[in-house]
């Protein structure tokens, strides 16, 4: 009946004692102040509707993102997946072809098909970097993650600025789901460009994947466009527990910074050890690694790890079918992964 539906398939979930390194979740729990804020809200306010406009949280996010942003520059949604869906509806039009990389977040083609938006998948360079010029002068707009997923590679802000400048009549959406593990966000460009929309999430660096809070940052006209779409579906934005928890997470800056630093340290030693085991490891600026082994195929390694109760992500699709995406877990988890990979490699010879 619904001809255009071709849904997104999330990473596998298995029951039991599984080391889950396949969906880029944060291995650390959220800040203790998040739990306090949520339990307070549960005790006192659940009988009340939440704020439809979420002004206070938008203000907190604006301040945390860039000193010159205001709540009018912030739109909040139920996870960045919902913000992405609303953005496709608000800014991309049927009949005008949009562009995104061939290797990218697999929800983009799903939304394009669902909303009847034609799209061109731009092949990446051989080293999986983004061919910047190929995104100039698009017919209907541009979207890609930075760092890109699943490649983990970061595109410099100067290059993003060139793409934004070369698409003056269209919206350029930069999906910064993993930006807190990278060098620099493109938010500084928002003062100069009204056609740039940045989408971020509390699911990764703030450990709130289960709470579902994502947001967009951009010119008030773009935020207004997103709000009109949202209001056509739901008077409310997110629930009271999500508002309270997300706000507490933004307010505990030290906890956020410590969690990021732990993950970056783990990313560094794991990258080095994987290279020593014969892997090509792309220079990641995210909370995951994109790797390929010189002798063992990605598919066999994925299957062998699964037999050992370790889940990583394998994409059965060229040109990345010989790569695995591995989420950075706690140090102990990663030591177990290393030991298991070493054991699997020994069995091969
Ligand atoms: N964008 C990218 C590139 C992602 O990898 C993800 C997580 N799967 C999301 C957006 C969605 O994140 P969430 O809906 O949890 O905010």
Image (spheres, rainbow, N blue to C red):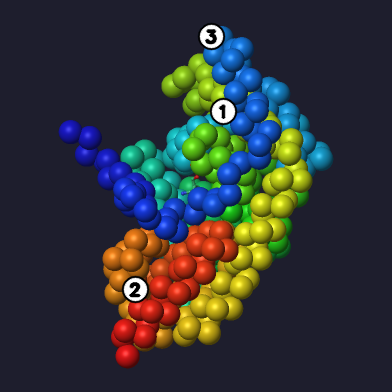
- N-terminal-most mark, 3 or 2: 3
Q: Position of residue 236 (x, y in %)?
A: 52, 19
Write the residue at 22% across / 35% down.
2
Q: Residues within 10 Å of mark 3 (few under 14, many from 20)?
A: few
Neighbor class of circle 2 (other Cα within 10 Å; few <14, some 14-19, many 20+) is many
In the depicted structure, whether residue 292 falls above or below residue 287? below
Rendered-image quadrant of the N terminus = top left
Mark 3 C-beta closer than 8 Å to ligand 1: no
Residue at label 2? 301
Position of 69 compared to 134: left or right? right
On the image, numbered disc 3 is attached to which residue?
A: 47
Which residue is at a point 53% across and 22% down the rendered structure image?
Answer: 239
Whichever of labels 1 and 2 marks the residue nearer the N terminus, that label is 1
> What residue sits right under mark 1 in the picture?
242
The answer to whether residue 268 is left or right of residue 253 is left
Whether pointer 3 and pointer 1 mark residues with C-beta atoms closer than 8 Å, the reply is no
């Amino acid at each position: 009946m619904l001809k255009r539906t071709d849904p997104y398939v999330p990473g596998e979930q298995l029951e039991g004692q599984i080391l889950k390194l396949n969906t880029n979740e944060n291995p650390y729990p959220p800040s203790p102040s998040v739990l306090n804020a949520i339990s307070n809200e549960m005790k006192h306010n659940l009988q009340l509707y939440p704020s439809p406009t979420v002004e206070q949280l938008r203000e907190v996010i604006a301040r945390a993102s860039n000193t010159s942003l205001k709540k009018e520059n912030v739109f909040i949604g139920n996870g960045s997946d919902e913000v992405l869906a609303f953005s496709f509806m608000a800014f991309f039009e049927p009949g005008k072809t949009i562009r995104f990389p061939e290797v990218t977040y697999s929800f983009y083609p799903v939304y394009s098909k669902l909303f009847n938006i034609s799209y061109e998948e731009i092949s990446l360079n051989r080293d999986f970097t983004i061919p910047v010029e190929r995104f100039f002068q698009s017919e209907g707009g541009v979207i890609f993650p930075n760092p890109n997923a699943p490649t983990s590679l970061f595109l410099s802000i100067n290059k993003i600025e060139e793409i934004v400048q070369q698409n003056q009549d269209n919206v350029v959406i930069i999906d910064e789901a993993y930006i807190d593990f990278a060098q620099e966000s493109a938010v500084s460009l928002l003062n100069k460009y009204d056609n740039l929309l940045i989408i971020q999430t509390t699911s990764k660096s703030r450990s709130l994947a289960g709470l579902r809070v994502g947001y967009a940052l951009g010119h008030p006209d773009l935020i207004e466009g997103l709000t009109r779409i949202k209001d056509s579906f739901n008077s409310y934005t997110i629930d009271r527990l999500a508002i309270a928890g997300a706000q507490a997470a933004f307010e505990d800056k030290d906890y956020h910074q410590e969690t990021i630093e732990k993950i970056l340290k783990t990313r560094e030693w794991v990258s080095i050890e994987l290279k020593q085991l014969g892997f090509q490891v792309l220079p990641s600026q995210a909370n995951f690694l994109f790797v390929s082994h010189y002798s063992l195929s990605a598919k066999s390694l994925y299957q062998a790890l699964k037999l050992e109760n370790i889940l990583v992500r394998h994409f059965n699709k060229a040109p990345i079918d010989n790569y695995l995406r591995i989420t950075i877990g706690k140090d102990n988890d990663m030591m177990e992964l290393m030991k298991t990979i070493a054991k699997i490699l020994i069995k091969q010879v």
